[in-house]
Image (tube, helix red, strand yellow):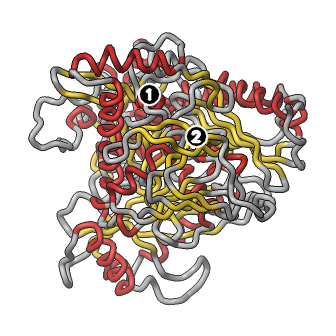
Amino acid sequence: MTAPEPVWPCSLAVDVGGTFTDLVLLDAAGATTVTKVPSVPADPSRGVLDAVDRVARRLGLPVARILANCHRFVHGSTVATNAVLEHKLAPVGLLTTAGFRDALEIRRGIRHDQWDHRAPWPPVVVPRHRRLGVGGRIDRDGKELEPLDEEGVRRALSQLADDGVEAVAISLLHSYRNPAHERRAAELARKTWPGDLTVASSELVPLIGEYERTSTAVINAGLVPIVGHYLRRLDEKLRRQGLVVPLLLMQSNGGTVPLDAVAARPVDLMLSGPAAVGGALHRSTGGDGGPLVSMEIGGTSCDVAVMAGGSVAVMEHLELGGYHLRVAAVDVHSVGAGGGTLARVDGSLLRVGPEGAGADPGPACYGRGGTEPTATDAQLVLGRLTPGRAAGGVLDLDADLARRAIEVHVARPLGLDVESAALGILTVLETHLRQAVETNTIERGRDPATMTLVAAGGAGGLHGSPVARALGCRRLLVPADAGVFCALGMLHAPLRRDRSRSLIGELEELAAGELGSAVDREVERLAELVAAEWPEGVEPRIERHVELRYPGQLWSVRVPLTGPAIGTRRAGPDAAAIRERFEAAYRRLYGHIQPGGRLEVTSINAVATGLLGEPANPPAAPVPTSPPASTGQRRCWLGPGHGWTRVPVHRGDGLRPGHRLDGPYLIDAATTTVLGLPGDRAMVAANGDLEVELR
């Protein structure tokens, strides 16, 4: 049975995850068509094309017709992320100031666990024989102490070419203050390599912090040949099939950008999928400012983010796989806890994660050759998932395979029955989920008990109520189409471009002097960039920020900046207002401030956002005249105190706005299953989201 033809034009978003590739088609009337297909880690573009083909078959239309009527195509990719995590970057050479070629390996010397001195660092991106120092020196004030040794640069480039290097990164000392030496070295390098394979750190991240700036430059250089090739190939394939609009990429900062503008900056795509959480939460709540904490649980991982005041925080630092990057990134905390997370017995202890079964072979119940138990197998054994077709017909869940995997690998080694072993798997997993939420709330100065927990992702609905109760939350929200949460969020994400640079000095002195003019210059340059990169007719909205710290501290705190707009002659930024915002943010983060303490500015930032038109709201559904009818009951284990219980089962497409459910209940939707525990009281909101009061 085919779905109704969309109201043209449409928007498409594809999110490539570790297990599934999700696609959302949103038409001009606000109706959505969603689909999931298995990801293809060896070639993610195949998963994208398979998803487009599958939604076309579901609509009974040619792929060419859908793509020709598509006015926005947004893509979230894990290609950059996986290349870094799997250490599969292209061979990179690094030119740095003579005597400083080991800064990349020395790092900051900071460990996550100060008591663990044995955990190894990840491999250095550029081995020492490809890190070459060149003569020339700029001091910390930007003055030239020694001219650049251009002949030394040429020799180093020749040596790197002989070594088979594909890309060159250039990171010279204090280039954030004076980039002249880096620019000249890059000019010489680009005569040897194509321009997009030479990365100068001052062009990418003109910020203080030699290690972070160098790390960002070399990782970006190593990604350009890989990610750039993938994106160009995908764009070419889509255009051959009929796509006429530029491909938009989801960035780590929560905004989108045209392909041509990001091809030379693939480091901005590190959190390409999870960063869409801001748009997704805004879609679910309308940005009403209520505090939310989202828990997006897919097949491989769980991504946690906080929305307060209608927005998700963006940081200037990102750590991925042990590598530190200076890129704007949504404040998302990720852990290896998803539906495909593996459960194993280590001695007499049950371990769940962080390893996952991935898309191939997947959980044992998929019947694709996997033999180790996962959280999905445990849910199936406990009756919370229905055996048979699932995930929109993509999967066929086999309860016998799930039971056998848990019995062999967990129940027998621990001397438990299968049901107790399955419950143990979920209990451990939900402990990891609770801790992940606490990391992004309690450790950021927020109390999760005062927030609404948003349980999204394909597995979010099954874990939402237990985790919310453990956190002390009173409200739970399960979004409509929760299984394609991030893909849907991409359609609500704005175009975005960030620009930052270092500016160091005392707050009061800079506010009375160059702070306002320096920010105005950055805004002018940002406006020029977006005018060249963005589609015509998109009006940018520009925000300005300043980062500050108490002298001697390593990390800075970003606050909004007040002051004159471009071209005005008013007084400079208000130092007292900036201090007040800094102290409020600092107190929330750390619990104290230094009253009257000196404040040091470290950098300035300008952010441009723009909309390609607001997506249409979903069409109004008829008001239900009768209570929701269940499709039957399923024997389900609800945990201690309840045991095996006959639980009413509802179809997701059978629920309408205004319908109410009292727990326990199960909702089998197209992309997720929702578990309601005894005492839960749920109502379907006007936009299709499930709002749950926890008692």
Residue 354: x, y in percent? 33, 31
Q: Secondary structure at mark 2?
A: strand
Residue drawn where x is 66% and y is 38% of the image: 14
Q: Please tell me which of labels 1 and 2 falls first in the chain.
A: 1
Residue drawn where x is 50% and y is 40% of the image: 459
Residue 202: x, y in percent? 44, 47
Q: Amino acid at mark 1?
A: Val
Mark 2 Cα shell of 10 Å, populated few (<14), some (14-19), many (≥20): some
Residue 265: x, y in percent? 54, 40
Q: Quadrant of the N terminus?
A: top right
The residue carrying mark 1 is 381
Quadrant in the picture for residue 12: top right
Q: Is residue 221 visible?
A: no
Quadrant in the picture for residue 341: top left
Compared with 511, 605 (above or below) is above
- Which labelled disc corresponds to residue 559? none
Asked whether disc 1 touches disc 2, contact meaning CB atoms under 8 Å apart, the reply is no
- Left-right relation of 279 to 198: right
Q: Secondary structure at mark 1?
A: helix
The residue carrying mark 2 is 633
Residue drawn where x is 35% and y is 42% of the image: 639
